[in-house]
Image (cartoon, helix red, strand yellow):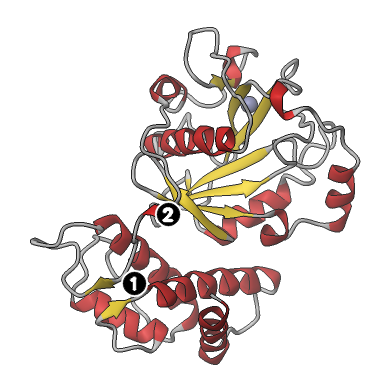
Amino acid sequence: MNLIGRSPGGRIVWFVTRSGWGCSAATEAFVAGRPIDPAAGKRELQVHHTGAIDDDDTPNRWIIADAAAYMRRLEVVRPDLGPLPYSLNGAVAEDGGLLLLEGRGSVTRGAHTAGHNVAGIGFGLLGNFDKDDAAAEAADLVSFTLWWLRRQGLPLDRPNPRGWPVWGHRDTANKSCPGNHLYPLLQTVATAGAHTLEDETMLPLKRGDGSPPREYRRSDVASVQGMLNIAGLVLVPGYSKIITDGLYGEATVAAVTAVLGTDGEDVNGNEYAALVRAVVAAEIKRLANPAAEVSRDDVLAWVADAIANG
Ligand SMILES: [Zn+2]
């Protein structure tokens, strides 16, 4: 799981590889046997939603573990299309960040859009955007993805029949996909502002950030708060969830202390990376064995390892 950039809307974007979400050896063998198409021939970004919703009160927002579990479902759910029909999948994260999840890959032939599997990249967003939840965030992720794939040398330069920069499945099939709330937003997709994080100093954050006179990085504080809640609820006995309001105040100080064991007054880059890795490791471990206890010592070991290894 890597931090790969920031979307035009200012959201942090993560990339989860097939091994990161737990792809099976059988699927890897299937993908390896699929035809490879020329990158220069990839001219259409074909946007889909996968249909099934996340089972809570935010149907189109996912925690990493549930998104990973859904990817494993995509290995088997459509035997007629084969494992992982999409080239790439995406999800809006519960904490407001965005996830890209590796599917078959950008030049490996997918099975997503009849008649457009050679010229198109199939981008499957987790959720059902006929429901009114997270469509703006999903469109922001589509914008980032268009920028990110073009940066890798895929032209993706052919507009849809309406002249929009990306396609929706309903452009070529009698379907509502990618959903009534997301489809109209595809005309607003634009790559300006997307960037890697090499050219910005994301952290450190410290007490007071997010409030006047230090409003900057409010979204970063919110992202940290979201991760603290994910890690805290799993790992810290008696942890109570904090509000992800982007304000680094007393509650956030206490949560940082509870989860990371530091004084909580600030979060530097290494601690941030450590928090991310601890969250992912905890979620994957929990997913692999829902009954397993993840101890605080496990997390501190991952934190130490993450700091040592960058
Ligand atoms: Zn579709």
Few, some or many residues within 10 Å of mark 1 (<14, 14–19, 20+): some
Q: Residue furthest bottom?
A: 297
Amino acid type, label 1: Lys
On screen, residue 75 above or below 128:
below
| Residue occupying image coordinates x 38% and y 52% | 96
Give the structural element (helix, strand or loop) at label 1: loop
Circle number at residue 197:
2
Q: CA distance from mark 2 to mark 1?
A: 28 Å
Discs 2/1, front: 2
Q: Is mark 2 within 8 Å of ligand 1?
A: no
Would you name the residue on which mark 1 appears?
A: 241
On screen, residue 71 above or below 294:
above
The quarter of the image that holds ligand 1 is top right
Give the structural element (helix, strand or loop) at label 2: helix
The reply to whether discs 2 and 1 touch (Cβ–Cβ < 8 Å) is no
| Image quadrant in which the N terminus is located | bottom right
Residue 203 coordinates in the image, percent (x, y): 33, 67
Amino acid type, label 2: Leu
Q: Which of the 4 quarters of the picture holds residue 284? A: bottom right
